[in-house]
Amino acid sequence: MRQFYEHVRVDKETLRFSVTCPICGKREYGMQLPFLCRGIRILARCEKGKANKLSQRIYNQTKANAVQQLAMHFNQCRSCYRFVCDDCYDVADSEGACKECVKKKHEK
Ligand SMILES: [Zn+2]
Ligand SMILES: [Zn+2]
């Protein structure tokens, strides 16, 4: 889960936490950035963990919730270890792999 946490970014346009699927490029959005963390400067500090106590605490909490929420839509491939969306994940594969890895397997 720690790894997935690092994939969750703040989308600067919508100000929501989001994750992008590396295969199809689909974006899944989670919670909105808390009001206290908005603004380019404060956001940059929050992302580095260097904001003021209150903003940082709210940021961390919201991000943790967003990660849980977004994790439901993403699956980790056991082969390449990327996090891909439900559409790019092949549940039929015995080990659980993304579609690209399943395709490679069949090509061999
Ligand atoms: Zn996808
Ligand atoms: Zn894969």
Image (cartoon, rainbow, N blue to C red):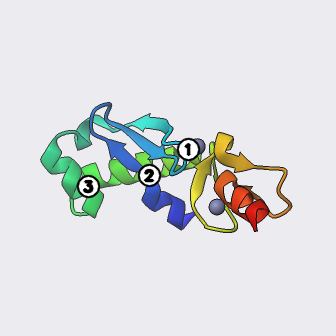
Give the number of the mark in front: 2 or 3.
2
Residue type at mark 1 is Leu
Q: Secondary structure at mark 2?
A: loop
Residue 107: quarter of image: bottom right
Question: If you read the primary sequence from the N terminus, does the residue marked by circle 2 or circle 1 appear first?
Answer: 2
**Residue at 28% across / 57% down in the picture?**
47
Left or right of residue 30: residue 75: right
Quadrant of the image containing the C terminus = bottom right
What residue would you read off at disc 2?
Answer: 8
* Label 2 lies in ligand 1 vicinity (Cβ under 8 Å): no
Q: Are marks 3 and 1 in contact (CB under 8 Å)?
A: no
Front-most of 106 and 20? 106
Q: Is residue 55 above or below residue 15?
A: below
Number of marks present in the image shown: 3
Quadrant of the image containing the N terminus = bottom right
Residue 43's spot in the image, x, y percent?
Answer: 22, 48
Q: Is residue 95 above or below residue 64?
A: below
Ligand number 2: quarter of image: bottom right
Residue type at mark 3 is Cys
Residue type at mark 2 is Val
The disc at residue 70 is 1
Give the class, few, some or many, for how many residues have Cα within 10 Å of label 3's Cα (few <14, many ≥20). many
Question: If you read the primary sequence from the N terminus, does the residue marked by circle 3 or circle 1 appear first?
Answer: 3
Residue 49: quarter of image: bottom left
Give the class, few, some or many, for how many residues have Cα within 10 Å of label 2's Cα (few <14, many ≥20). many
Question: If you read the primary sequence from the N terminus, does the residue marked by circle 2 or circle 3 appear first?
Answer: 2
The disc at residue 46 is 3
Report the Cα–Cα distance between label 3 and label 1. Answer: 20 Å
Residue 55's spot in the image, x, y percent?
Answer: 26, 49
Q: Are marks 2 and 1 in contact (CB under 8 Å)?
A: yes
Give the number of the mark in front: 3 or 1.
1
**Residue at 43% across / 42% down in the picture?**
18
